[in-house]
Amino acid sequence: MPAEISRWSPAAERILRTAAQLIAVRGFAATSTRDIAAAVGVQQPAIYKHFSAKDDILAALVQLGLERPLALADELAALSAPAAVTLHRWLRESLEHLRDSPYLLISILTTPELQRTRFSAEVDLLARFDRVVIGMVEAGQREGDLRAMNPVSAARLVQALFDALALPEIAVSPAEIVEFALTGLLSDPAGLPEIQRAADALVVSPASP
Amino acid sequence: MPAEISRWSPAAERILRTAAQLIAVRGFAATSTRDIAAAVGVQQPAIYKHFSAKDDILAALVQLGLERPLALADELAALSAPAAVTLHRWLRESLEHLRDSPYLLISILTTPELQRTRFSAEVDLLARFDRVVIGMVEAGQREGDLRAMNPVSAARLVQALFDALALPEIAVSPAEIVEFALTGLLSDPAGLPEIQRAADALVVSPASP
DNA sequence: GTCTATATCGGGATAGAC
DNA sequence: GTCTATCCCGATATAGAC
């Protein structure tokens, strides 16, 4: 399942980028379709030629944010590298994906509006995301590289760190987040440099343009 | 500045508790005053006898969430214990405060709606909260207990971990969060048990009923 | 595919009786 | 201090011309 940016027309993409910026600051409910249209430079009904409902914009943003990390997890799992190494690489690339996507911020992926039934498909994606992290932590613990702790708690803590990327200024870099996360997870934090080298050496398909 | 729950009438307190539950799940904008009133068991205008605007409810919740941690930070600063010890105690009690307050969840304290100018006083409280964490990290680094890293990044990472307390199920305990945070911050994670004992031994005024 | 005009609805807030 | 009734506004979404 590729599912990349190119599936959107240039006009739809401009709407998505603009909407994401506004939503990240004000929240989804507080961002009106008029706000989005004004920021794009069109009248409000023009939005509806590209998205048949405001909710569809949020759904598209969540999908754009999660599909790359989920696909990357599948790819990394096939490499059968140590789980701690896989986790390191996956974290770094997932964080970079969110940082570099001008229309994506973690706050959008975790906004409470997603609880509504309209967004059950997107909640499913978030659940898959959760399982990916839990699975990597469990594997790393079995292999002995990650210290013993509740793997569900560990996965929650790692995911919570994604929020450090958030607005206003993106002060925390992906590298800092990965370092902090793995320092908290590893049985022997002194082994981090070696794990990082191995993670950087893994070969996966490149991120989309 | 005590500023405790008792400043609210029982009816107002029921509104706050109910509103917080709904807001935590659906978000502030998606929670109507009718929703809150229905959950409380009254008609919608009855809310306005206790709060003159819906925004006042959110402001009250933010204040209830932050005042205890801010007051505790002042108290701990006066003890002149090592900063790593102070940070440990402050983190644990602040997390427990949020966990135990039935109407408080970190997602409410970080909702994007707070960006509106109406909530500048509450944003100021959040900024003080931020400075408290940064200050403790910087002091701990000067004293050598915390490892060298950008203190602003470190503070962001620690605050991001607060989100691990969030809904749906509160799977991550304050103790787990504190352990993870300090493991990531300490120069020598092996010293954590000793710091924890010292933190537990600090004497501060008890949390409110 | 963008415009103007507009239908429709839900939500915040107020008035005034009890 | 809670009720019913209501005002008013802003927001989503649609209709139809260009």
Image: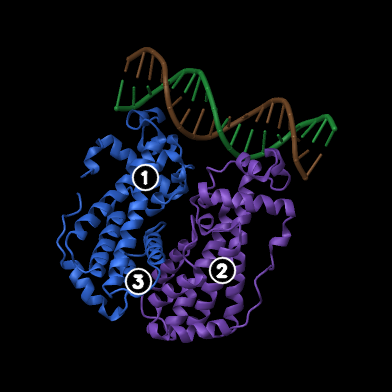
Chain colours: A blue, B purple, C green, D brown
**Element class at badge 1:** helix
> Is there one chain holding both mark 3 and mark 1?
yes
Q: Label 3 amino acid?
A: Phe
Q: Which residue is mark 1?
A: A122
User: Does the image show residue A102?
Assistant: no
Q: Label 2 amino acid?
A: Glu
Q: Is residue B91 above or below residue B51?
A: below
Which one is closest to the eye, mark 3 or mark 1? 1
Q: Label 1 amino acid?
A: Glu
Q: State how many labels appear.
A: 3
Of B149 and A139, which appears nearest the observer?
A139
Whole-percent x, y for residue B153 in the image:
39, 69
Please give the chain letter of the residue carrying mark 2: B
Say whether residue B203 is left or right of residue D17: right
Task: Tell me the residue at 33%/52% (across/down).
Answer: A128
Q: Which residue is mark 3?
A: A180
Q: Which residue is mark 2?
A: B96
Picture quadrant where residue B78 is located? bottom right
Alpha carbons under labels 3 and 2: distance apart: 23 Å
Say whether residue B123 is left or right of residue B38: left
Q: Is residue B110 above or below residue B205?
A: above
Q: Is residue B198 above or below residue B31?
A: below
Whole-percent x, y for residue B121 in the image:
59, 57
Alpha carbons under labels 2 and 1: distance apart: 31 Å
Alpha carbons under labels 3 and 1: distance apart: 28 Å
Of B154 and B97, which appears nearest the observer?
B97
> Is there one chain holding both mark 2 and mark 1?
no
**Element class at badge 3:** helix
Task: Tell me the residue at 40%/28% (across/down).
Answer: A45
Q: Residues within 10 Å of mark 2 (few under 14, many from 20)?
A: some
Whole-percent x, y for residue B110 in the image:
50, 56
